[in-house]
Image: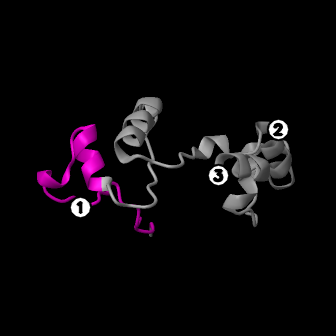
């Protein structure tokens, strides 16, 4: 007898009303104003430079830190992963790596000033 799948083919996250959606930099900035730390995650294709520039201008930010500027080099990441992946990336193994393992300590210092 085949096992019944528990995979959800139609996942969704319930959303609020249309009034909860801010639609321009001024509206977005007014909802974010007063927060000490803001993290923005973007889909591929977003004009990140424009988003950063416009939000920074309106929110008077002290520091902007991009995660992409804090990662280790591709060569360092390959070396870190080699014991877990070997020569075939399809057959990697579970490991104890944590988020901090992917970050370059010097880049973190540089980007946190």
Q: Is residue 5 magenta?
A: yes
Side (left or right) of 74 relative to 68: right
- Residue that label 3 marks: 112
- Cβ atoms under marks 2 and 3 closer than 8 Å: no
Q: If the image is split into quadrants, where does the N terminus sit?
A: bottom left
Disc ID at residue 72 = none
Q: Earlier in the sequence, mark 2 or mark 3?
A: 2
Please tell me whether mark 3 sits on a helix, a strand or a loop: loop
Question: What range is drawn magenta here?
Answer: 2-31
Side (left or right) of 61 relative to 68: left
Give the distance between the C-alpha atoms of the residues marked 1 and 2, in whole angstroms: 41 Å
Across and down, in percent, residue 58 comes to 34, 42
Q: Nearer the viewer, mark 2 or mark 3?
A: 3
Residue at point 44% right, 49% down?
A: 40
Q: Main secondary structure of the magenta part?
A: loop
Total numbered labels placed on residues in the image: 3
Across and down, in percent, residue 75 comes to 82, 38
Q: Earlier in the sequence, mark 1 or mark 2?
A: 1
Please tell me whether mark 1 sits on a helix, a strand or a loop: loop
Disc ID at residue 75 = 2
Camera-side residue of 74 and 5: 74
Disc ID at residue 14 = 1
Give the distance between the C-alpha atoms of the residues marked 2 and 3, in whole angstroms: 23 Å
């Amino acid at each position: 007898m085949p096992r019944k799948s528990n995979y959800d083919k139609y996942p969704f996250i319930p959303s609020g009303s249309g009034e909860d959606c801010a639609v321009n930099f001024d509206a977005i900035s007014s909802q974010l104003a007063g927060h000490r730390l803001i993290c923005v995650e973007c889909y591929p294709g977003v004009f990140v430079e424009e988003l950063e520039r416009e939000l920074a201008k309106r929110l008077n930010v002290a520091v902007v830190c991009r995660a992409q500027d804090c990662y280790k080099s591709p060569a360092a990441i390959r070396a870190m992963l080699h014991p877990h992946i070997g020569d075939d990336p399809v057959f990697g193994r579970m490991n104890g790596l944590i988020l901090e393992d992917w970050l370059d300590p010097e880049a973190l210092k540089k980007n946190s000033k």
